[in-house]
Image (cartoon, rainbow, N blue to C red):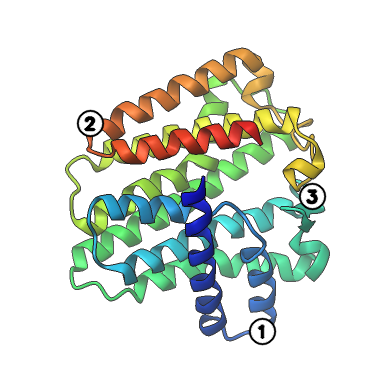
Amino acid sequence: MKFIFDYKKLFEDKLESFIANSIINSDIKNSLEYSLMNGGKRLRPWMINRISELLKINDSHAVDKLSFSVEILHTTSLIHDDMPEIDNSSLRRGKKTNHIVFGDYLSLLSGDYGFVFPLKIISDLKIDSNTIKNMLFSSFSTSTLKLIEGETEDVLFEKLGKSPSKEEIINMYRKKTGELFGLCFSIPFIIKDETNNLDEIYESGLKFGVSFQIYDDLKDIYSTEDELGKNINTDDNKLTLLKIIGVEESKRFADNLFEEVGNILKENDLEDFYYDLIKIKSYIEKK
């Protein structure tokens, strides 16, 4: 996992500088920066960077800005997730959650800002091809909407006491977690203007996201609060796949999906990326 940790330091230095020079309102900046700089594996921006590297993309400016955009969107969704009206969490990555530090009103508003800010970053990208820029904007905005749909379905399953099927849970996972991974897998191919197999690449990201969510659900069962750095057993009132088909069957389902991801990546000359994902999977399962 050294490759992730090395990238994480470089990325965070760039991200901190970007935020410091890009957000004018100090209240929003302080709130958003608090959560953005509060650790995390930086897995999603690393994926964009790694695939871009394998595709030999030289536009580091676009790669960096799109990596910032995805991480801002991901962090924003966590800010809203942690609020009392949704998960009511007090810890995130070992520190107090945003609303505990800044209050519900500022967390809500800085979260709103964080959903829109990435689209502004993309609109300001210096890319000569309008087709590529429009495709990036469309892909990002679509994934943002689907992410919110997935979060909504997750909350309503819990709050309204619905009894979703296995297929409905998986579809929710595809949106809530898979969408951002699908976006990350796709972004470098869009920049490179290699879109013949884009749907297949995007689908592999969705499948990775579902498997990732199941592995994360398993961690919530077996880990302590200190190990996770967040409140444990937050899924007690949620209908996860584990509760519908059981722990062992869920693990098998996730492993099969992960293998499917590998097959797609190998077919698209991303075998090295898949081997990196295997190392990440092993790390996640041990944590």
On the image, the x and y values in percent for residue 99 come to 78, 63
The residue under the point 60% across, 66% down is 112
Disc 1 target residue: 26
Locate residue 154 relative to residue 71 in the image: left or right. right
Q: Identify which residue, 40 or 279, lies in the foreground.
A: 279
On the image, the x and y values in percent for residue 207 come to 43, 32
Q: Amino acid at mark 3?
A: Ser
Q: Identify which residue, 60 or 250, lies in the foreground.
A: 60
In the rendered image of this protein, does residue 18 appear above or below residue 221? below
Quadrant into which the C terminus falls: top right
- Packing grade of label 2 (10 A; few <14, some 14-19, many >=20) is few
Count the marks: how many?
3
Locate residue 216 relative to residue 129 in the image: left or right. right
Task: Judge depth for marks 2 and 1 and give the one in front.
Answer: 2
- Packing grade of label 3 (10 A; few <14, some 14-19, many >=20) is many
- Choose top left, top right, bottom left or bottom right for residue 268: top left
| Residue 89 badge | 3
| Mark 3 vs 2: CB contact within 8 A | no
Q: Amino acid at mark 1?
A: Ser
